[in-house]
Image (cartoon, rainbow, N blue to C red):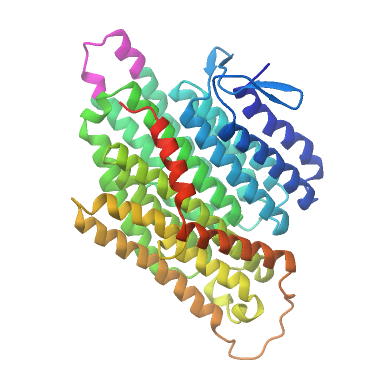
Amino acid sequence: MIAGPLLLISLPLIAAAVIYPFRRWSLLTATIAAATSLFLGLACLRLPLDAPSTLWRWTVQLGQPVIVLGRELALQPAGASVLGFTFLLSAVIFLLAGVIPQGHLFPPMSLTVLSMIGASILVRHPLFTVLALWLAVILAAFFVQGDRHDSVRGALRYVTMHTLAIAPFLVTSWLLDLHLENPDSVAPLRTLTILLTLGFGILLAIVPFHGWITAVAKDAPPLGSALLFTVENLAVLLLLSDLVQRHPWLLEDPLLLQGLTWGGLLTLMLGGIMAWVQQDFGHLLGYGTLSDMGGMLMALGTGTELGMQAAVTLILFRAVSLVVTGVGLSAIRRQRSSDAFSDMEGVARQQPLSTVTLILGGLSLAGLPPLAGFAGRWQLLNFFAPEHTNWCWLIFLAGWGVAFGYLRGLRAALSSPPEPKEHTSSPEPLISIIAAIATITLAAALGFNPRPILTLTARIVTALPMP
């Protein structure tokens, strides 16, 4: 019998090893990576955790715990739902990457990242969860950098900030052991809360620790950014929920929740304001994501189940928006080798569907109806409306800041060059057109009928360990 944790960790690593020698055959590697992710995603969402199941000739029990290096790995219901969504999202991204390549290293390294993300969710110890996340970040840095030689900023900031985040969790683990030995001592508790607030502030990109978000969005392949900005947030949310469940006194000290709330408000506003004035689509994607993450942090800061539900909803709908944006931005970067507004003259005429996909994805990220992102933003507004009306206005204005940034980009794309120029760009490939239409249709369909995402959100939040 194969234990679920071993399957979820080892299968992506095996697939990565198989496709790595063929990494320059983007369609082949993307197809194998997508098939692996689809298989694991359906297994997590459909197979029972408490009973064995037969997959071809294999007998698998997803919920069976295993001991690796003295640590227990176990798949809990919330983790199964999160990993199910993560693998299904990855399958979609891999299929799109086969059509619009994201770099030779993207499929194999993404599979190793998914393996480490799975390990971080499965391991039953907060410190080892953070270490597994750190390994995922190091592996992700390879496809963030890709074949670039002009800049290492994105990969360097990504690894540096997450390395700094480890230190607070290392000290926290040591202080928790001391507290367990001497429960009557309350002196370390305040220090623990400060350290955890700092650690989560870095992992969740709270201002002023937000620089890695915009750097990754600028340097990484766009669909890679969509993957990282989604799966890492979900893993960190599970870590936060697990810590609060293990140590309910964290909610008694207002520092952690206030840090999330006011840090989230500052992050929301900074993202909206900076998106307003950006001059390229890469940084605009980063600040749009940052603004959305600010709303997520504000919801988490309430420390309630409804707040957690609003936060998870935002993350899931953000994933859809980022995938749509990533398809359009990848196609334009591939033809123009730049995403600066100053280089966008005439692109709407040469690549009309890619331009539409990019702008609609950005407007979805901003939360404008009737696109998918509106459903997540509406959940957030409904949550804050009864008691925090002023915050609703700030959320609304921040969203319009992001939307205005993309409208400025659209204006640049619609403009004509002052002098006729010969362009070497070829017409949009048919397969790219199909991918763009499919992602736009998905965003619109989820905007009009968000029930599948809301159902999955309820499934995750219901299974989360709450104090």
Q: Position of residue 392 (x, y in %)?
A: 26, 58
Q: Residue furthest left?
A: 387
The reply to whether residue 201 is in sight is yes
- Among the 4 quarters of the image, the one containing residue 240: top left
Q: Nearer the viewer, residue 286 or 372?
A: 372
State whether residue 160 is above or below residue 466: below
Given residues 34 and 213, the one toward you in this image is: 34
Q: Within the magenta stretch, is there residue 239?
A: no
Residue 37 on image: x %, y %: 65, 40
Residue 247 screen position, x and y as percent: 31, 22
Residue drawn at x 60%, y 49% is 144
Magenta span = 175-189
Quadrant location of the C terminus in the rendered image: top left
Q: Nearer the viewer, residue 455 or 396?
A: 455
Considering depth in this image, is 445 or 356 the residue closer to the camera?
445
Farthest residue, direction bottom: 419
Give percent across and percent down for residue 265: 28, 52
Look at the image and tell me whether residue 157 can be seen.
no
